Amino acid sequence: MNTHTTSAALAVWSNADFRRLTAGQLVSQLGNQLHSLALPLLVLSISGSATQAGTVLGLGTATYLLTGLVAGALVDRWDRNRTMIWTEVGRALLTATIPLALHWQVLTLAHLYLVAVLTGVLTVLFQTASTTAIPNIVSPEQIPEALGATQAAGRALGILGAPVAGIAYALGPVVPFAFNACSFLVSALSLRAIRTAFQRTAPGAPPTTPRPDLLGDIREGLSWLRGQPVIRLLALVEAADGLRYGAGYLLIIELARQTGANAVQIGLVFSGAALGGLMGGVVAARLTRRWPLGQLAIVMVWVEALAFPLYAVAPSWPWLAAVALLESVIAPVYSVAIDTYRMTMTPDHLRGRVNSALGTLLTGASAVGTILGGLLLTRMGAHTLTFACAGWLVALAILTTASGAVRAATVPEPTRD
């Protein structure tokens, strides 16, 4: 690692507000992992219905699709730090009702549905505000290191989170939800300790032109996106890849099952993916600095396209884990590169709307991919679907390579309001 990258990485971790933000997010992420495993198990224990369990889990996606654009407009109007704090407090209170209802033996499916919807709305607001924080907490030249650090830390926690979640639920169904409620409060306290403003223009300050209504705010963000050919094309490519990614989870499980892998071994395949993501997060900032965005995007999408068909020829679960590791190295590198570009290109007062629009697009594509994946897996079989997905990725790689705007893309100078 060169001296500049090393000094930038050290400077990021010497930033107290960045440490507070990252620590709070990691604690909350662990709580969410425990919650995500426990929730379907709890629904199954109450109803015995896999359909009910899938519906509760799917409410988060549905909520994002319905409220994402409005959340972006609100986040650009409101104080983003306070928004994050109060949404964490709200999620803590809502989540705490589950262990309390369990303790008093009054928990119902209707209760779980209501909590899922309300926490989903708060989560959309929190995540939208969160995506605007880093460019205002660290200096512009430190953005790649900050993003790489959060990617690596999140992936490392992902490796440990699954077994911890299983242990927590084994201790009792109350434990994961109680921990998650506490994790939201820890995150809120860490945010409360941050003194740096999460936006450059004070919330409520008189705008230079009359502020439109929320619909006008949304149109302003979408209009800005339409004028950005690189962000627009790469977002469409990401969404198209999200169709494949949504199908990939079930596909890999079925391929592993066909090799004779048991549940533990299937879990180890995904541990390989988590380890690959950790490795990618460690080197992401260095690669982002070394290579222009366009070149990096093209290389990443071609590597993914050429690696994916290896799933179909992997003879055993260790080979599947190796392929998952290889493919997963790519995701955080690409994510850091494109997020650095977006964060430095997008004016601060539009970041909430731009990020929410992109998040809605990608979330919707992944949801559709999950549904289509199950249908196509039944009709085509695992191996045929794998090669079909690989062909889809090759088409996206060709589209990306053919774009002159993408080939010439480099990270611009930071945009100042």
Image (cartoon, helix red, strand yellow):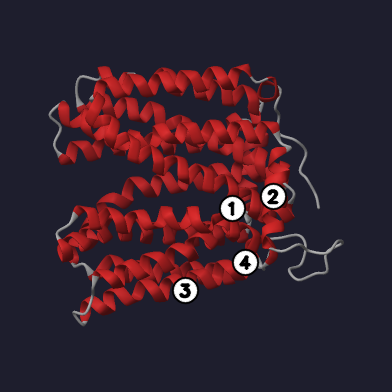
Residue type, mark 2 in image: Gly
At 54% across and 30% down in the image, what residue appears? 237
For the N terminus, the image quarter is top right
Q: Is residue 81 above or below residue 11?
A: below
- Spot occupied by residue 118 in the image (x, y as percentages of width and height): 43, 68
- Ranked by sequence position, the earlier of labels 3 and 4 is 4
Count of labels in the image: 4
Alpha carbon separation for disc pair 3 and 4 = 14 Å
Q: Are marks 3 and 4 in contact (CB under 8 Å)?
A: no
Closest to the observer, 184 or 355: 355
Q: Depth-wise, is mark 3 or mark 4 nearer the camera?
A: 3
According to the picture, the residue beneath numbered tag 1 turns out to be 131
Instruction: Give the side of residue 415 with respect to residue 274, left or right.
Output: right
Disc ID at residue 81: 4
Q: Is residue 163 above or below residue 373?
A: below
Disc ID at residue 297: none
According to the picture, the residue beneath numbered tag 2 turns out to be 221
